[in-house]
Image (cartoon, helix red, strand yellow):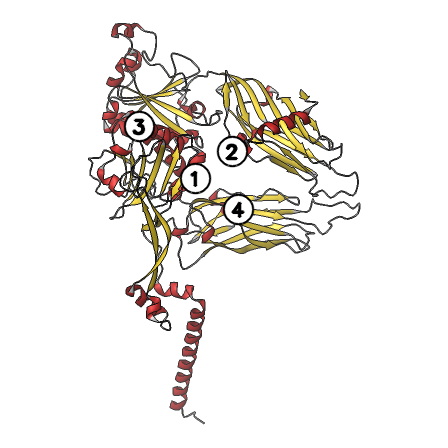
Amino acid sequence: MSRYYPHALLAACFWASLSCSTTWAQALQPLRVEQVEGEYRIPLGWLNNQHHAPIELRGAESRHILKLPISPRLAIQEAKIEMVYTNSISLLPRSQLALTLNDRVLAQLPVKADQPDHAARITLPLDGLAPGYRELGFRAAQHYTNECEDPSSPELYSQIDTEKSVLRVKTTRRAFKPSLARLDDIFDRRLWLDRYTLHILLPPQAMQQEELRQAAAQLSQSIASVVDYLPVSIQLQELKPSMPQEDQASSARRFPGVNLPDTAWDAVLLGTRDQLLPFLSAKQAAQIKSGYLGIFHSDQDPTRYILLVSGTTAAEVRDAATLLNLPGLALPDREEIQLAELKLEHGYKRKQPPQVEKGWITFDQLGFHTTSMKGMYPPPARVEFWAFREMFDPARPFIELQLNFAYGAGFDKKSALNVLLNGQFIQALPMQEKHGDQVFRAKVRLPTVSLRPGMNELSFEASMIGEDVGGACEPIFTDNLRVTIFEDSRIELPPISDYMSLPDLGLLGKTALPYTRLADGHGVGLMLSDLSPATISSALTLLGKLRQVHKAPLISLRILSPTDDLTGLEGLIVIGPINALPESIRTGMTAFMPHQRWQTLMIGSKIETDMVTGVKRWVQDPLIPLVKLSEVTTPAVAEVNLSEGLGQSAALVQYVTDNGLPVTVLTAADHEHLVGGAARLVEHSTWGALGGSAMLWSMDGEAIAKAEPVTHSFIGEAPSVSPVSYLLSDRPGLAIAVAIGLITMLALFTWFLLRQRARRLNMDT
């Protein structure tokens, strides 16, 4: 089943010599899947969350699992893995590295101290590669001595190169019966793609109708949510009748005149029944009697599919597309359906976990289940929650976590349960009871400064060391090293707030805020500078990404033109080439606007006098001179203007208007670069780099530059906090003095009352 290369050391050295001059440059390049004539070449790093770092296997026994997605649309003919790995030169010949598939050992690879660099090719059995998510595993058994071994010795390690190690798979496309219940299998996130391109086929002039533009927006969001984490770019294509009407009537094709692009997996056909008559068979057109959804084989190729979204009116088409975008929708196992009625509520808030007690949310409501960990260094337990710093009371710089957990007997005093927030150490909970213990509501304070916008991750890393830590030829017992974290643990989270500081593209990238303050996008406008396919495609690409980030449909978002009234809007997104943007948008842009305002840079600070601020400060600190308190620091800036345009770059700029309207602009020099820039923006490497008030990137995604805001604006309702409570929390010494003063006053008042009573009763003596 496996074959080893006898001269692996020479081969590894040869590869190293070729790559030594380019390694650092390639480290920034995203790992890509290559496909040539039906054979896929998949780097292991692509399967390992796009990480370039090698897989580390440390200790006497170590394992690492990669999830291998397999789509039912691919029939695998052959699969091989080419591994390049390096082991420690201290390992004994009894050490080995094993490759597993679904926990079944496929190959045991040699580990040699005098030949640390190896390469191997292993054939994977096809019966273990059924559709779904398979587990490709690496298991190391490593030893540096035959007796008295420390299993955690640093000499015990092996590395698997995730860039040079690749999975090669030969496939053919597989056809299956189309069904609306299997849309997830057709628009499949398990396909080995770096980017999913959605082709929307339209009849001529369809995008001139507002309701069809709304339908395209709902469709783009729907498919983006189905493929989940895959970047999605939208391409609009206007159809042209290519068959005479008399030939169309006699044609056996369901979609006469509709030809999918060679690069397309599938396509969506969108339009009213009358608009699509030149592209539908008479039998198919007769099926459309109201809002209509149908999934069918392409006439060109039965392994490719066409999703038909139609209706007798543009409003019915919009409703059918909106239906697809609803979360949790269950569709029947059939090719087509008619929509009888769709009623929607608008303006609802973001979904949040219910609070069992006011201000508290338990772990099970965050999707966490009771988890046990075993051994000295087990994988951490993790729980995620949604938050950002501005939603919390500024008077309290922390939120509280109450953890319920239990641990076993025989722990050494160095054992602890470490709590981390977003990878940063927060607190250690000791586990020192020799007979074990159950701990109820252990308190942990999480500083709000460590929160990041959007999803935050709490991880619990158990460092468990037994009392019997071994010694000279003495074994180490680890079966008693167990910790369980219970799902009734809880965290202090207030209701989700919409108070935030802008501009902040990082907040947009992680949460889709400020455009999701209402979950359905109510009050948000998407303005198109023109109705060209390039501009609309770019807008739909960005909208699909926001749907993936937000995890909810933006069904109330409005598609606007430059002449529409903006009254009542709470957020605006503008898409178009730089010269086609409305003058009001060009004037408001704070960066990357040629001939007007390219960038404002903060180069230092300067001190000015503000008597109003000084008086406010003097009220709090009357012992400090007013002149000193009136000094305020303001930024010293450099304003830069360029006469040239954006060139090969695309730009995303965010600013807040004078009346508090947040505006985000996606633009480029022309339509071609706008489409390319939008497609590159939604890729993980570019989207993950969003930050500041504006960002530039090139068509290859490499040249990324940011502009930081000089000033900030706050929008939304600020967390309620009284000036007194803020002052006391900010000055704990003053709070103690106030408490002592109140107690003293109460004692004196009590003494006075008792003294008066004594006088009335003649008890002075």
- Identify the mark nearer the N-term, 2 or 1: 2
- Identify the mark nearer the N-term, 3 or 4: 4
Q: Which residue is mark 4?
A: 423
Mark 1 and mark 2 in contact (Cβ < 8 Å)? Answer: no
Q: Is residue 142 left or right of residue 391?
A: right
Q: Is residue 214 above or below residue 451?
A: above
Q: Which residue is mark 3?
A: 671
Q: Is residue 630 left or right of residue 358?
A: left
- Identify the mark nearer the N-term, 3 or 1: 3
| Kind of element beneath mark 1 | loop
Which mark is in front, 4 or 2?
A: 2
Q: Which mark is residue 25?
A: 2
| Kind of element beneath mark 4 | loop
Q: Position of residue 530 (x, y in %)?
A: 25, 29
Q: Circle 4: is it few (<14), some (14-19), or many (20+) Cα within 10 Å? A: few
Which mark is in front, 4 or 1?
A: 1
